[in-house]
Structures are given as C-alpha cells and as structure tokens.
Image (cartoon, rainbow, N blue to C red):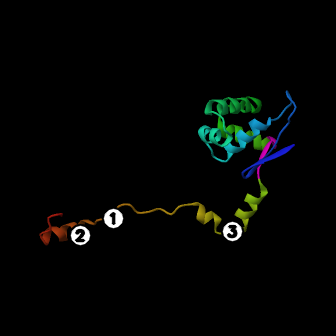
Amino acid sequence: MQITQGNWQAKINPERGSLGFTRTEAVDLMLLAAGNTYKEIAKATGRSPETVRGSLQKSYHKLGVYKAAGAVAEAMKRGWIAPLLVALLISGINPDMDAMRHRQPVRTRTHSSVTARINQRANGSLYA
C-alpha cells in the first residue's frame, strides 16, 4: 500500500509485525525527509514531540540507523520512501535551477584602501 505526504510517497505494511513502516512511522519519516523538526511534525500530525520522537526511533530501529539523515537515506535505498517524480521533473525542466539554488555572495563590508585613508588624513577628515 502507498501513501503520499507533501512531495514524498511511502510504502507501508498495515499488518502488525510485518517488515516496513506503519502508516504513522511512514508519515513521520516523510515529514522528516521534507526537512521538518520533531516539533513541526508533532504540530502537523496533532501529537506531542515525544510521541513523534518515539515513532521515529522505531523507524530508526527498523532501518538499523541512529540518526535522521541515515534513516532517510536507508529508507530511500530500500525503496520504502521516495520523493515524488513531479518534483524531480520540475527541477529538470528549469535550466537555471542550479543557479537559483545557490545564493550569490554579498559583500557586507566596504573595502577602504590605504591610499584613500591617507588622502582623508591629508584633507583633514575627522574619520581618517
């Protein structure tokens, strides 16, 4: 059985004791993969952050990992969760997507040359 959450889809096994995720574990992991924190997942699903943490810990155990990034990577590797194809197609359509992804460096400080400071002193500036 497959379910969808945001830009992610997951395969679930509703039978108790079977391999794979339960519906709750799958939803929590898809929200985690989308970049949400435990608090954000809890708010979205109407549960407490501790309940979400417990659910995700069960998912980590099933996957044999200890951290969120490892859980998402392992679940994708096993084919238990996957990003929707639409998101991949849209990023492939726009050739400037890579350029839009990276923010250009912003100069935060104006550079003052030694010559400019000497000229300010020569002109009697108080700020030189």
The residue carrying mark 3 is 94
How far across and down, in percent of the image, does residue 10 sit?
80, 44
Badge 2 density bin: few <14, some 14–19, many ≥20, Cα 10 Å: few
Separation (CA) of disc 2 from disc 3: 45 Å
Badge 1 density bin: few <14, some 14–19, many ≥20, Cα 10 Å: few
Please name the residue shown 63% across and 63% down the image: 98
- The reply to whether the magenta stretch includes residue 79 is yes
Separation (CA) of disc 1 from disc 2: 12 Å
Label 2 with label 3: CB-CB less than 8 Å: no
Q: Residue 116 carries which label?
A: 2
Which quadrant of the figure has residue 2?
top right
Which quadrant of the figure has residue 121?
bottom left
Of marks 3 and 1, the one in the foreground: 3
Work out which residue is located at the far front of the displayed protein and give it: 46
How far across and down, in percent of the image, does residue 9 sit?
78, 48
* Residue type (three-letter) at the residue carrying disc 1: Thr
Viewer-nearest residue: 26 or 71: 26
* Residue type (three-letter) at the residue carrying disc 2: Ala
Work out which residue is located at the far top of the displayed protein and give it: 17
* Residue type (three-letter) at the residue carrying disc 3: Asn
The residue carrying mark 1 is 110
Span highlighted in magenta in the image = 78-83
Q: On the rendered structure, is 36 left or right of 104?
A: right
- The reply to whether the magenta stretch includes residue 43 is no
Q: Which of marks 3 and 1 is nearer the N terminus?
A: 3
Q: Earlier in the sequence, mark 2 or mark 3?
A: 3
